[in-house]
Amino acid sequence: MKMTSETTSLQPLKQAMKRVEKKLQTLETQFEELDSAMENLTQKFEFHRKTLESQAVQDEMWTAVLEIKFTSLELNIFYSYIIETLHYLHSQVLEKLPDLERRLPTLATVLKRKNNNKRIRVVWDTVLEALGLQEEDVKAFCTFFIAHSSKAEYYSANLRQMYIHDATPMITNIVKNQILQNSLLHAVQIIENKKTAKA
């Protein structure tokens, strides 16, 4: 009789413990959901921050390219190195992907498809690394090309040599934007090294 009485008196306590346990489980679930929501929000903010940073860099690049008052000679020299570098980039990608030559007729198609094709992306990254380039260099080349291709004239290597022995001092003296300056210096280095290797 005593045991029955004790069991009966413990019953409300057990029920209360179950209710507490259920509430704790509910709270745990809510915390997990909140944690997941916070993680998603953090990822979105991070993506947004990177997008804004990228946009700011791109805006700065456009400003740098458009603000500099190049002489005809300077414009043509820089334009020629950029054109040859972009062409060389494209040829290096095709060299590693000969079966995709028809599907990648221009560098623009490579740039467009590399984000959705892992094989192209891997080759693209490999080529950039081998040439000592980064994505920001390619963006700088493309920005310069878009901004000035309508009025620039291509100078061959022999013609460039007639006008100027070394383009490096010209770049460092005229171009003050660090990203654009570095990208142009990379372009000159790539083409001159290629010319030396060929010779």
Image (spheres, rainbow, N blue to C red):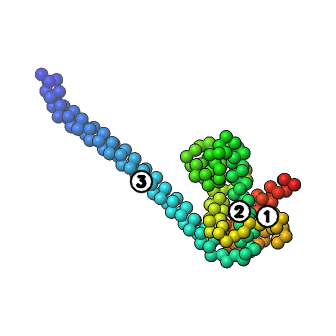
Q: Nearer the viewer, residue 87 or 197?
A: 87
Instruction: Find residue 24 and report its image quarter.
Output: top left
Quarter of the figure that contains the C terminus: bottom right
- Between label 2 and label 3, give the one nearer the viewer: 2
Which percent across, then down, holds residue 152? 69, 70
Question: Label 3 amino acid?
Answer: Leu
* Residue bearing the label numbered 2: 82
**How many residues crowd around disc 1 within 10 Å: few (fewer than 14), some, or many (20 or more)?**
few
Asked whether, in this view, residue 158 is left or right of residue 94, the answer is right
Q: Earlier in the sequence, mark 2 or mark 3?
A: 3
Q: Which residue is mark 1?
A: 156
Q: Position of residue 12 (x, y in %)?
A: 17, 34
Residue 112 x %, y %? 58, 52
Look at label 2 and name its amino acid. Answer: Ile
Disc 2 and disc 1 in contact, CB within 8 angstroms: no
Return the residue nearer the eye: 134 or 107: 107
- Element on which disc 3 rests: helix
**From where the camera sits, is residue 11 visible?**
yes
Closer mark to the observer between disc 2 and disc 1: 1
Left or right, 30 with respect to 176, comes to left
What number is the disc on residue 192? Answer: none
What residue sits 32% from the left and 45% below the top? 30
**Nearer-the-camera pick, 3 or 95:** 95
x 63%, y 62%: residue: 142
Q: CA distance from mark 2 to mark 1?
A: 12 Å
SS for callout 1: loop
Q: Quadrant of residue 72?
A: bottom right
State the image quarter where residue 137 is shown. Answer: bottom right
Image coords of residue 49 (percent x, y): 49, 60
The residue singled out by tag 3 in the image is 41
